[in-house]
C-alpha cells in the first residue's frame, strides 16, 4: 500500500509552513498517520546541508553548486524518510519538494528546466507528489511577512534575494500550476488562514478517502468536510 505525498509550495512569506502544520495537526487528530517534514532537511545530513544553503555566512553560491546541494539533501531525505513512510501507507506532508527546485533554481537562477527535471527524478527515484498546494502571494506581501517573522537582519541567504528574483520564482510556480492543473491546487495566500486551511484539508480528505488509507485506531475519524 502506498501512502500520500502532499507538498506545499510558494515563495517566502506565502504561509505554506503554517498550512503544513495545520494540515498535519488536523489529520493527526482525526486518526491519520502523518509524517510532517521539510526540504531541504528532514534527516540529519539534509539538515546540515540546509544550514549551509541558508546561512548568510555562506556568501554567494554558484547556481550549479546550490542546485547540487539541494539535490543531495533531497536524495538523502527521500531515501531515509519520505519513501519508507509512503511504503508504510502514511500521509507525508512536505514543506517544499521538487517543484521548489523548478521554481527557484529554474525560474530564479535560470538553470535549464530539462536538467532540473532529470536531476529531480534521479534524486527522488521518480517520486511525484500526489497533490501540491501552491500558496500564491504578491512578492511585496511575502517580503513584509518575512520581515515581521524574523526582521530584515534575521533573513536567511535565500530570503535576502532581490524582489526581481522572487518575481521570477513566483512566475515559474504559476507556470508549473498551469502545466499540471490535475496535481496542483492553487490557493490565494493572502486569504484568511482559516479559509485556506479549510480548502486544503477538504482536498486532503478527498484524497485520503480515495486511497482508503489506514487510520491509527480511529474507526470513525472526525472529518473536517
Image (cartoon, helix red, strand yellow):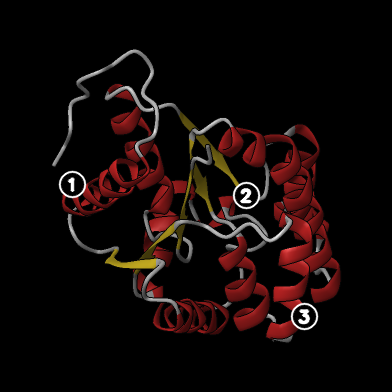
Q: Residue at x 53, y 41 (%)?
A: 2
Marks 3 and 2, Cα distance to the nearest angstrom?
20 Å
Secondary structure under badge 2?
loop
Residue drawn at (39%, 37%), measured in percent from left and top? 21
Q: Residue furthest top?
A: 217
Residue 32: % across, % down: 36, 28
Mark in front: 1 vs 3:
3
CA distance separating discs 2 and 1:
24 Å
- Residue 115 - label: 3
Q: CA distance from mark 1 to mark 3?
A: 38 Å
Front residue (pair 159, 197) = 197
Reading the image, the residue beneath label 2 is 39
- Helix, strand or loop under label 3: helix
- Residue 167 higher or lower than 20, as above or below: below
Between 14 and 218, the residue placed more toward the observer is 218
Closer to the chain start, of discs 3 and 2, is: 2
Q: Secondary structure at mark 1?
A: helix
Q: Nearer the viewer, residue 137 or 5?
A: 5
**How many residues crowd around disc 3 within 10 Å: few (fewer than 14), some, or many (20 or more)?**
few
Residues under numbered marks 1 and 3 in contact, where contact means CB atoms less than 8 Å apart: no
Q: On the image, which quarter does residue 201 sit in? A: top left
- The residue labelled by disc 1 is 194
Q: Is residue 42 left or right of residue 86?
A: right
Query: Relative to 137, does residue 72 appear above or below in the rendering?
Result: above
Where in the figure is residue 5, as x and y percent of width and height? 50, 48
Amino acid at each position: 500500500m502506498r501512502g500520500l505525498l502532499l507538498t506545499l509550495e510558494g515563495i517566502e512569506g506565502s504561509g505554506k509552513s503554517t498550512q503544513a502544520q495545520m494540515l498535519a495537526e488536523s489529520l493527526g487528530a482525526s486518526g491519520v498517520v502523518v509524517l510532517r517534514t521539510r526540504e531541504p532537511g528532514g534527516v540529519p545530513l539534509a539538515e546540515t546541508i540546509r544550514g549551509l544553503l541558508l546561512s548568510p555566512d555562506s556568501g554567494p553560491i554558484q547556481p550549479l553548486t546550490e542546485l547540487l546541494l539541494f539535490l543531495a539533501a533531497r536524495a538523502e531525505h527521500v531515501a531515509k524518510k519520505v519513501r519508507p513512510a509512503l511504503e508504510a501507507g502514511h500521509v507525508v506532508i512536505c514543506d517544499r519538494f521538487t517543484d521548489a527546485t523548478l521554481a527557484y533554481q529554474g525560474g530564479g537562477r535560470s538553470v535549464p528546466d530539462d536538467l532540473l527535471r532529470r536531476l529531480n527524478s534521479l534524486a527522488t527515484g521518480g517520486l511525484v507528489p500526489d497533490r501540491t498546494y501552491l500558496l500564491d502571494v504578491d512578492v511585496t506581501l511575502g517580503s513584509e511577512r518575512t520581515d515581521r517573522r524574523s526582521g530584515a537582519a534575521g533573513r536567511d541567504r535565500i530570503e535576502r534575494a532581490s524582489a526581481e528574483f522572487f518575481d521570477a520564482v513566483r512566475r515559474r510556480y504559476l507556470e508549473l500550476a498551469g502545466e499540471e492543473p490535475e496535481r496542483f491546487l492553487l490557493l490565494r495566500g493572502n486569504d484568511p488562514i482559516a479559509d485556506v486551511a479549510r480548502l486544503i484539508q477538504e482536498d486532503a480528505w478527498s484524497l485520503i478517502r480515495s486511497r482508503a488509507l489506514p487510520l491509527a485506531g480511529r474507526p470513525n475519524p472526525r472529518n473536517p468536510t
